[in-house]
Amino acid sequence: MTVLVSSLWPELAAALALGLVIGAVTGLPRGRIAMMAAGLLLLGLAALTGLAIWQVLPGAAGFRIEAGALVLGAYLAGCGVGGLGRLAARRAS
């Protein structure tokens, strides 16, 4: 896992930064459609994580699944932190 993260750190940093920006611009999901879209993304992350943990696909395909799970997780974490930052900034002003 350390080798995977050390080889993917530029992608992870970019996904986290993009998530922070998107979360800060759009905020946390409030509407029904936005909540359903966020739920689908979280479901996708759970599916990718499950496939990576159970090592369903060997070789390069397994690497792509693990990389996708890590990058999607970083993006969603950035979106959440950016959305919380927007909420905190709104409450402070």
Image: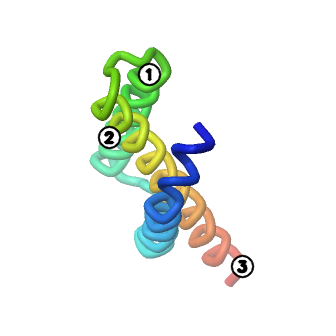
In the picture of the structure, the residue carrying the numbered disc 3 is 92
Sequence-wise first label, 3 or 2: 2
Identify the residue shown where x is 53% and y is 59%: 9
Q: Quadrant of the N terminus?
A: top right
- Name which quarter of the figure residue 43 lies in: top left
Question: Tag 3: residue type?
Answer: Ala
- Residue type, label 2: Met
Front disc: 2 or 1: 1
C-alpha gap between disc 3 and disc 2: 29 Å
Measuring from the top left, give residue 52's x and y in whole percent: 43, 26
Task: Judge by depth and name the residue closer to the eye, 80 or 31.
Answer: 80
Q: What amino acid is found at the position of numbered circle 1 in the picture?
A: Gly
Residue located at (67% from left, 70% from top): 88
Identify the residue position indicated by label 2 in the image.
36
Considering the image in quadrants, where does the C terminus appear?
bottom right
Residue drawn at point x = 41 percent, y = 43 percent: 67
Report the Cα–Cα distance between label 3 and label 1.
Answer: 39 Å
| Cβ atoms at labels 2 and 1 below 8 Å apart | no
Label 2 environment density (alpha carbons within 10 Å; few <14, some 14–19, many ≥20): few
Q: CA distance from mark 2 to mark 1?
A: 21 Å
Q: Residue at x 52, y 65 (%)?
A: 13
x%, y% of residue 75?
A: 46, 56
Return the x and y of residue 79 as percentages of the image width and height: 49, 59
Q: Nearer the viewer, mark 3 or mark 1?
A: 1
The disc, 2 or 1, on the residue closer to the chain's N-terminal end is: 2
